[in-house]
Amino acid sequence: MSYEFEIADCIRMTHSSLIRDYSNTVCGYDDGINLTIGQPDFHTPDRIKKAAEEAIEKNFTQYTDDEGLLELREAEAKYMKKSIHAIYDPSGEILVTCGATQGLDAVIRTVCQKGMEVLLPAPIYCGYDPIIRFAGSVPKYFDTSKNDFEISGEMLDHAYTTYTRCLLLASPNNPTGSIMTENEMNDIVQWLLKHPDVFVISDEIYADLTFHGNHLSLASVPALHDRVIVISGVSKAYAMTGWRIGFVCAPRKLITEIYKVHQNEVSCAASISQFAALEALQSDVEPKKMCSEYEKRSVFLYHALRKLGFDVVKPEGAFYLFPSIRKFGMSSELFANCLMKEMHVGVVPGSAFSKYGEGFIRISTAASMEDLQECVSRLKVFLKQLERKENGNITDVYESGENSKYLQELNLSRSMGVPFRRR
């Protein structure tokens, strides 16, 4: 006799990552071009790998302090002072976490009560939503797509309720590549000063991949220092996604509480990875080189997409473009599915980034220039196919016959959590 175990509602109602689903699917094609995952296509710099090897040789393989190596926290404090002019005490105001995601989870669980709302300017990274729901809180989206992905005080006013607890910001932004401008920052600051009960969680994992000017952070505003929590890490800027090292920087009274969650979730981040991250923060040469390359790719793809007829906001950071596909009369998921099926190009439908991402697709430039050029060539062919179908209903054409079978197989593989392989 078997027993039917009941799964928690917040888990049962959560779907697997749509980004991973599309990545797994395009990997099933021998000639597939994967522009889905937000992962640097560079290797971790040799000096960082060597530091990890030395840590192993010296047997630094045990637990570190739960807060992380003091030397690493000191290095992060220097980085924060240099990059955004924010002062943090490494002994009590910085926490080393198992990647930025684990840090965010610990923060949300600390500052959000059950039923409290977290404001999310959308489109926004899809990984925030489940973390918020797992903590019993409520993601509250508001639309920035009609304002070139910029936030205004008016938007915040409309989104705010008596249940609002946090405002979660990400600059540079995933999926749009936009950054917080000075005018935008001033609007947000003025709004926050009128709402002293709202915390700010600032995801700055892409901070070093800002193309022009200085990265702007609310943590640099003295009047907001007591309620701004910065999430950062080495994953994107140093091509260290697999090393899983992040940072939480916040006032001592908050870190004291966030630490309780972190300690009981993971004890500490991996010691070898911490020594690697310590070496990473000794220089910003590699992030600058990578950022320059991402900018070149983004500029190329931006102009190529515009030439093909896409409406797209020029990215100012990170490694994503978020072009609109509304003029083609297809949903973002159908567009991405058919581009995959016919051209073997993997992109992510905008609907993965909330309902306000519908009508867009996300394209990652964390790929070689050769792959991006090939993507443009295949997009050109794909758009010509759409033109030939203009006399009929495009959606009907793609959802009928062989294409319908393809979409059914794709959705089935997604529900099963396995890659869909199609030649």
Image (tube, grey):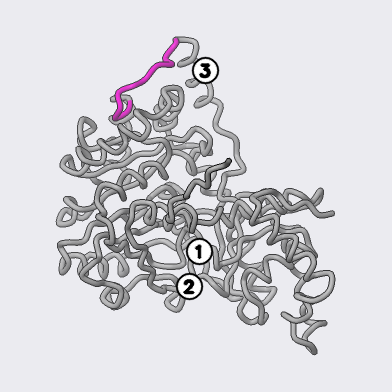
Q: Measuring from the top left, give residue 314's x and y in whole percent.
A: 52, 67
Residue occupying image coordinates x 29% and y 35%: 95
Q: What amino acid is found at the position of numbered circle 1 in the picture? A: Phe
Which residue is under mark 1? 353
**Measured along the vertical axis of the image, is residue 206 above or below residue 149?**
above
Q: What residue type is labelled 3?
A: Glu
Mark 1 neighbour density, 10 Å: few (under 14) some (14–19) many (20 or more): many
The residue where tag 3 is placed is 53
Point out residue 119 in the picture as x, y percentages from the top left corner. 32, 65
Q: Is residue 346 above or below residue 290?
A: below
Q: What element carries label 2?
A: helix
Q: Is residue 298 left or right of residue 283?
A: right
Q: Is residue 244 magenta?
A: no
- Residue 130 or 186: which is nearer the viewer? 130
Q: Which residue lies at the image location 31% right of the left edge and 33% below the top edge?
A: 264
Q: Name the residue under label 2.
A: 356
- Percent position of residue 377, x then y: 77, 64
Q: In this picture, which residue range is highlighted in magenta?
A: 59-68
- Element at badge 3? helix
* Quarter in which the N terminus is drawn: top right
**Residue 259 vs residue 366: left or right?**
left
Q: Distance between the residues labelled 2 and 3?
A: 45 Å
Q: How crowded is mark 2: few (under 14 residues within 10 Å), some or many (20 or more)?
A: many
